[in-house]
Image (cartoon, coloured by chain):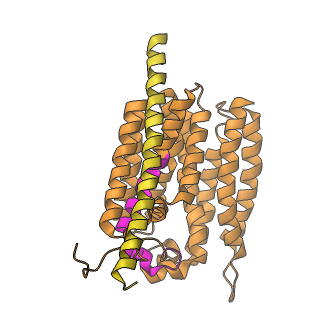
Chain colours: A orange, B yellow
Amino acid sequence: MDAAAPMTLPADWRDFLALTKPRVMSLVVFTGLCGMLAAPVTINPVLGFVAILCIAVGAGAAGALNQWYEADLDAKMRRTAARPLPAGRMDRQSALHFGVGLSVFSVLLMGLAINVLAAAILAGSILFYVLIYTVWLKRRTPQNIVIGGAAGAFPPLIGWVAATGDVALLPVLLFALIFLWTPPHFWALALFVKTDYANAGVPMLPVVSGERTTRTQIGLYTIPMIACAIAPWPLGLTGAIYGVVAVATSIVFALFALDVATRTTQSEDAMRPEKRLFAYSILYLFILFGALVADRWL
Amino acid sequence: MDDPRTQADAVRKRQRARATVMAWILGGLVVLFFAVTIVKIQAGMGR
């Protein structure tokens, strides 16, 4: 190598890890694991570990491909400007290769070690997140996260299918629960980071339709979401442990959502109810899925 | 980081760190694939 030629510093391994969005992955792993543990049949622990690994790696791959495609958008938002690509710590091609490599690896391993149906749903969830949400919807419509939310709803279904090899009503309800949970969760966030999304030109609902519509939509989506959360109990798919927890936590969610839906932003508003709903919505999902597993095993 | 030698050292250091992480991952996968094979063989024998 010519000593005078400028050398490019290769990306740090921690930057590759950051591409996988580890914090998002934790919720994906948790819901996938709960879907698997809530299934009526047990899976060998080694195979169970492999299935969860595949779900995690698949989610990481989707996150990496999302960041590869959105590097320009991430650079415009304070929340995402420090990510490896917009910060210039990694070239886009490395991110693309990393994302595609992880996708292929996770789907192949799931298919070979677990079952073809779980692998097919995993492949579908990665493609849905990258092509439908990231490439098609995100920059075009304020309904981006409504339809894109389906991508995040797949893990419990994949976990269940990994254990049973089949689709049933309970994992479909869990899918619907996360699908309907996504709009109030993200719109609560969008209400207090509105300027960031507006600067980047992302047509989030508060930017396009205004705050009033967003607040109303948060309230409206909460109703079917709560119905999906409680439904497994009266349908006889779970016991009282899950039922009581689902009713209690859903009442709190409804109260927080009602607060957000009925108020109006004041000048110098700290947006506390919106931040509270956003934080609680994450806790809500963790508690519900935890209760589902407790109900199955206790 | 204008000095070519310092630059080269930084590149080597980063390459070494990446290679170490990759080695751990590959080692983990070897163990995992071995365990999966054993489980699959046992499941086949149980039929």
Q: Residue at x 32, y 61 (%)?
A: A96
| Front in this rendered view, residue A150 or B6 | B6
Magenta-colored stretch includes residue A18: no
Query: Looking at the image, is A124 positioned above or below residue A99?
Result: above
Q: Where is residue A156? Give x, y as percent.
A: 54, 42
Where residue A73 sits, quadrant-wise, is bottom left
Query: Looking at the image, is A131 positioned above or below residue A212?
Result: above
| Front in this rendered view, residue A23 or A200 | A23
Question: Which residues are drawn in magenta?
Answer: A56-80
In the figure, is residue A143 to the left or right of A272? Answer: left
Q: Residue furthest bottom?
A: A267
In the figure, is residue A247 to the left or right of A153? Answer: right
Where residue A36 sits, quadrant-wise, is top right
Q: Magenta region's main secondary structure?
A: helix
Q: Where is residue A188? Give x, y as percent.
A: 61, 69
Q: Where is residue A202? Give x, y as percent.
A: 43, 75
Q: Residue furthest left?
A: A2
Query: Looking at the image, is B19 positioned above or below residue A124?
Result: below
Q: Where is residue A32? Give x, y as percent.
A: 55, 43
Q: How many marks?
A: 0
Magenta-colored stretch includes residue A72: yes
Q: Quadrant of the C terminus of chain A?
A: top right
